[in-house]
Image (spheres, grey):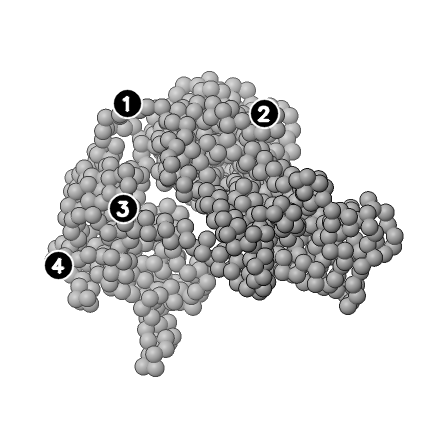
């Protein structure tokens, strides 16, 4: 074989329209447009700016936790205890309010509880080496159980006005933007930059695709995973602070089942449950799609149970669809 | 299934299986072009070629995973088409893969009879009969383990035996072995070759795929050589020399090992003193100099990789000191080692070295990513500068630098992994079996490159189980045996016999 004259290797493959069209984020943008068009068609109230603003209340708190959950799932871990952390953090906030603590304490106690819960999860997973799905199923019961033991069948309602105002008023009056939505948007930008532009983000993808090779490449795999559990706990605590301020009460069943809604946002956003791939823009798009479908359906008075059936089907179809299409294309 | 129900014909029998003008293309690649050959009963046929020559495609066609675009497969004298692995299995073809694909949590007997378990009159699995037949089959190849043992309790060599037994259970007439010796020790390889001889004697046709020429000449009767998807040679193994096979494979004559470069040995760079861990190695002491290539030779399990991984901070040391350029080092993680200037190219490329789903660029800069951070962000242009330079230097063959590493051939993957470790700008580079499982062409490139590194003043540790490689490249050879340094030999004052005898713990040749 004569050694052929070799040309320099290109930096990247030539850009093709089809690659761009088949990107998951592109599909999600299409889906979002369909949802917005559909909602506009079925309800005249949908495009009202105040209605839209109120709609963000329904998903912003979950979406904040979804950002951290996305990083965790990219590194092949998961945290099922987030909703229970929210319950425990909300309880702590409530107890602080009952004891007459000042506003700054009410704002900080939730995230602080979240950090402790996240660190405990992280220690069990990375320090002892237990699988995260098992650990967080356990701590899910543990954290919510603790909240229920302390609370019994009580409800804490004595929250000061300056605290509840954070959950019930706008941070910016025009366009009307609630605190929780603004926090979500800012965090989304920060997370996107960290994941896609920094060395830390690169390391997360390396861990998710091959943790052994990542370790051999000098990446402190366990320390990074521990940090992500703490971060997820922190954001769950922050979500608890915002949620408690919005509804102005703490009940034992607060945020019940949210962990699945949060994971749904992450998976629909294109983060592989096997780890190693996914983007923050994808997760943000999924958040809007899920939030607006829920909002649109509730505008035309579809019951909540039916909405969850519809969202379940959407998740399955949107995950299975591209796989089936790819299989068909390959089969030709 | 008439073919396999009767006992295969005795040694030297006629054709069992033939491929006629097989072609197979994938988008953009012609994997096989008009390939024909015949397998005879009672013969071992070596299928050879560089990585990417089309060997795996042949195996996948024979085992029904791929369907050829054109051409015909004949089993016995009747044409066959396999549209699924089941068809191929039913025609009497069994394959033993590089990495065994079986069921770790199931018993040996269940693994042997998976898919065709004996069934009693009531329609349930006949466990008694299954166990009895499994024991009989295992005895036939002198395998001395319990049919009830769980597969995960067995060694790789024993798992190979289970796969062979599985093929026997079906009276397979063609047995394909794809690099079966890659993970085996010397004794285990001897056992395997004994079993292959027995399969031959029973009149089965064996296809043997290996990169190791000594094995091919030891075990094969015939050969088929592929290059770029075409058959470039075939015949009796007795009629060719190793040099001839190599030139067939690469299309040009090639030196297996590049001539040793003349490099001045400089001052001491790395000094290891009394390094020990709890179980695998003890009292490892040596010095490594600038420009030196220090070989580490020993049998599988002698503790070479374990000692190197400890030196690199992957596993904790029990005692011992390490110093670099006279300064004592405390290494508790690979990050510490990399920062100090020690790079380690691990043995298991797929698991430990490469992140296959990521791109070439991301792999090359993985261990040195901090040096590409400009104002908090990773600078892609800075990365690409390194990638282009190292990629060119190592002659990486790829479509572009964003291509997934998993899409490249094994040899090119290894070049990318080595590039990653050079990007970390090491003073000491440890290469653990750097040419394991890669083709001859890439192997020569890697050998040449190791010499180049030493010439540039790096201190190189070369861990290898291939004696020609060690003796061709190293200035000194540390021979390990059962976790300890048995002896250190110097170039010019060694012989292959002496080194092997020391490694095996045999009496020294006088």
Q: In the picture provided, is A124 more to the left or to the right than B145?
A: right
**Residue bearing mark 3:** B57
**Vertically, is A325 above or below B142?**
above
* Mark earlier in primary sequence (2, 3): 3
Chain ID of residue with mark 1:
A
**Residue bearing mark 1:** A5
Q: Are marks 1 and 3 on the same chain?
A: no
- Can residue B70 be seen in the rendering of this structure? yes
Mark 2 residue element:
strand
Q: In the picture provided, is A140 more to the left or to the right than B301?
A: right
Looking at the image, the residue that sits furthest to the bottom is B122
Q: Residues within 10 Å of mark 4 (few under 14, many from 20)?
A: few
**Vertically, is B218 above or below A150?**
above
**Residue bearing mark 2:** B374
**Residue bearing mark 4:** B78
Chain ID of residue with mark 4:
B
Badge nearest the viewer, 4 or 1: 1
Mark 4 residue element:
strand
């Amino acid at each position: 074989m004569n050694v052929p004259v070799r040309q320099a290797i290109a930096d990247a493959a030539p850009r093709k329209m089809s690659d761009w069209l088949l990107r998951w984020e592109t599909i999600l943008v299409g889906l979002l447009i369909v949802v917005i068009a559909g909602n506009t068609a079925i309800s005249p109230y949908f495009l009202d700016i105040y209605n839209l603003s109120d709609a963000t209340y329904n998903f912003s708190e979950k979406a904040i936790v979804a950002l951290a959950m996305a990083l965790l799932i990219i590194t092949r871990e998961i945290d099922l205890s987030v909703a229970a952390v929210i319950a425990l953090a909300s309880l702590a906030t409530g107890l602080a309010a009952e004891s007459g603590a000042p506003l700054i304490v009410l704002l900080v106690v939730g995230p602080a509880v979240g950090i402790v819960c996240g660190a405990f999860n992280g220690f069990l997973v990375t320090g002892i080496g237990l699988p995260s799905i098992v650990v967080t199923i356990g701590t899910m019961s543990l954290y919510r159980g603790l909240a229920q033991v302390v609370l019994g069948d009580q409800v804490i309602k004595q929250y000061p006005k300056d605290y509840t105002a954070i959950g019930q008023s706008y941070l910016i009056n025009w366009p009307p933007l609630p605190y929780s939505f603004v926090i979500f948007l800012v965090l989304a930008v920060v997370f996107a930059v960290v994941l896609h532009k920094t060395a830390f983000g690169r390391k997360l993808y390396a861990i998710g695709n091959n943790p052994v090779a990542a370790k051999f490449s000098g990446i402190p795999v366990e320390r990074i995973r521990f940090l992500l559990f703490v971060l997820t706990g922190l954001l769950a605590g922050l979500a608890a602070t915002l949620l408690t301020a919005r509804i102005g009460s703490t009940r034992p069943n607060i945020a019940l089942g949210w962990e699945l809604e949060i994971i749904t946002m992450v998976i629909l956003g294109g983060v592989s449950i096997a780890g190693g791939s996914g983007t923050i823009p994808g997760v943000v798009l999924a958040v809007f799609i899920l939030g607006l479908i829920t909002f649109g359906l509730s505008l035309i008075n579809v019951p909540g149970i039916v909405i969850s059936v519809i969202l379940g089907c959407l998740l399955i179809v949107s995950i299975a669809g591209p796989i089936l299409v790819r299989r068909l294309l390959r089969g030709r | 299934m008439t073919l396999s129900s009767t006992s295969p014909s005795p040694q030297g029998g006629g054709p069992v299986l033939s491929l006629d003008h097989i072609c197979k293309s994938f988008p953009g690649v012609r994997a096989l072009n008009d390939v024909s050959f015949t397998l005879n009963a009672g013969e071992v046929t070596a299928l050879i070629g560089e990585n990417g020559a089309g060997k795996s495609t042949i195996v996948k066609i024979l085992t029904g995973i791929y369907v050829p675009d054109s051409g015909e497969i004949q089993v016995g004298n009747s044409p066959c088409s396999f549209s699924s692995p089941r068809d191929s299995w039913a025609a009497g073809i069994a394959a033993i893969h590089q990495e065994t694909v079986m069921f770790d949590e199931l018993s040996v007997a269940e693994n042997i009879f998976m898919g065709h378990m004996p069934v009693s009159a009531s329609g349930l699995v006949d466990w008694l009969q299954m166990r009895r037949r499994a024991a009989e089959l295992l005895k036939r190849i002198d395998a001395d383990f319990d049919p009830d043992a769980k597969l995960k309790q067995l060694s790789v060599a024993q798992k190979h035996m289970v796969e062979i037994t599985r093929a026997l259970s079906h009276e397979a007439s063609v047995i394909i072995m794809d690099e079966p010796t890659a993970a085996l020790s010397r004794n285990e390889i001897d056992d395997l070759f004994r079993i292959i001889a027995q399969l031959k004697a029973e009149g089965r046709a064996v296809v043997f795929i290996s990169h190791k020429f000594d094995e091919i000449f030891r075990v094969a009767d015939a050969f088929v050589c592929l290059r770029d998807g075409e058959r470039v040679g075939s015949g009796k193994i007795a009629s060719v020399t190793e040099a001839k096979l190599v030139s067939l494979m690469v299309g040009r004559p090639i030196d297996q090992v590049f001539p040793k470069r003349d490099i001045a040995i400089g001052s001491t760079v790395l000094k290891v003193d009394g390094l020990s861990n709890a179980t695998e190695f003890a009292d490892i002491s040596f010095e490594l100099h600038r420009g030196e290539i220090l070989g580490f030779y020993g049998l599988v399990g002698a503790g070479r990789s374990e000692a190197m991984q400890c030196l690199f901070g992957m596993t904790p040391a029990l005692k011992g000191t390490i110093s670099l350029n006279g300064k004592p080092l405390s290494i508790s993680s690979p990050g510490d080692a990399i920062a100090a200037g020690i790079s380690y190219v691990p043995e298991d490329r797929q698991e430990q070295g490469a992140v296959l789903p990521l791109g070439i660029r991301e792999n090359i800069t993985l261990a040195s990513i901090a040096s590409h951070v400009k104002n908090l962000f990773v600078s892609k242009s800075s990365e690409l500068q390194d990638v282009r330079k190292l990629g060119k230097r190592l002659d990486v063959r790829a479509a572009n630098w964003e291509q997934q590493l998993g899409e490249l051939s094994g040899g090119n993957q290894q070049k990318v992994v080595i590039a990653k470790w050079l990007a970390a700008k090491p003073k000491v580079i440890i290469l653990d079996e750097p040419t394991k499982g890669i083709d001859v062409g890439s192997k020569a490139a890697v050998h040449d490159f190791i010499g180049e590194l030493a010439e540039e003043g790096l201190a190189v540790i070369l861990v290898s189980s291939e004696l020609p490689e060690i003796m061709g490249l190293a200035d000194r050879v540390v021979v390990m045996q059962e976790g300890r340094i048995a002896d250190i030999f110097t170039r010019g004052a060694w012989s292959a016999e002496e080194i092997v005898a020391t490694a095996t713990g045999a009496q020294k040749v006088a």
